[in-house]
Image: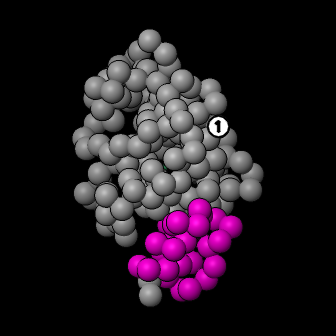
Amino acid sequence: MGSVAVCPGSFDPVTLGHLDIVTRGAKVFDRVIVSVLNNRSKNPLFSIDERVALLKETTAHLPNVEVDSFDGLLIEYVKNKQANAIIKGLRAVSDFEYELQMASINRKLDEDIETFFMMTNNQYSYLSSSIVKELAKYQASVTDLVPAQVETALLEKFK
Ligand code: ADP
């Protein structure tokens, strides 16, 4: 069996920061499954289907990347997919505490699934989906922050 990593997140919407992590992850793992968390407690701008569609379009050039969505416990999903790793991006120190907690609880649930962290590309260290939505809401340019398809989708949402 090759190495298979799940890259989970809200991706509401996918940004160049996410794509940087996915692209780098795809060089290290045989397969990467980017999976949209169906988290009902959040109030998303894009539906699950829209988020999956945008991810599919923007990762289509990466042959070993697939896109999916999931509900419930991440570790159960990872096991169902027969994956052996989780990849996450780290931006600031503020990401660290939460991610340490998640990685620790996930290891307790299944010690055979390892979490790998990649440091953000410096040019994206300030970038989050929330910032992008905030800018788009006030008609500020997001050209350097998201892929072209996402910019179009944002313009459509806020027009
Ligand atoms: P957000 O915090 O932007 O809502 P998600 O929940 O969609 O992000 O995040 C999915 C994963 O992508 C997380 O591991 C998160 O740390 C990572 N990530 C998000 N934005 C960036 C970025 N600009 N650089 C590196 N990693 C990032």
Residue drawn at (61%, 56%) of the image: 16
Looking at the image, is 82 positioned above or below residue 13?
above
The kind of secondary structure element at disc 1 is: helix
- State the residue position of label 1: 24
Q: Main secondary structure of the magenta part?
A: helix
Q: Nearer the viewer, residue 132 or 41?
A: 132
Magenta range is 130-157
The C terminus, quarter of image: bottom left
Q: Residues within 10 Å of mark 1 (few under 14, many from 20)?
A: few
Q: Is residue 17 left or right of residue 110?
A: right
Q: Quadrant of residue 11?
A: bottom left
The extreme right residue here reads 122
Number of marks present in the image shown: 1
Q: Amino acid at mark 1?
A: Arg
Residue 150: x percent and y percent? 51, 66
Residue drawn at (53%, 66%) of the image: 149
Residue 26: x percent and y percent? 58, 33
- Determine if residue 89 is in view: no
Asked if the stretch drawn in magenta spans residue 35, the answer is no
Residue 14: x percent and y percent? 50, 57
Asked if the stretch drawn in magenta spans residue 150, the answer is yes
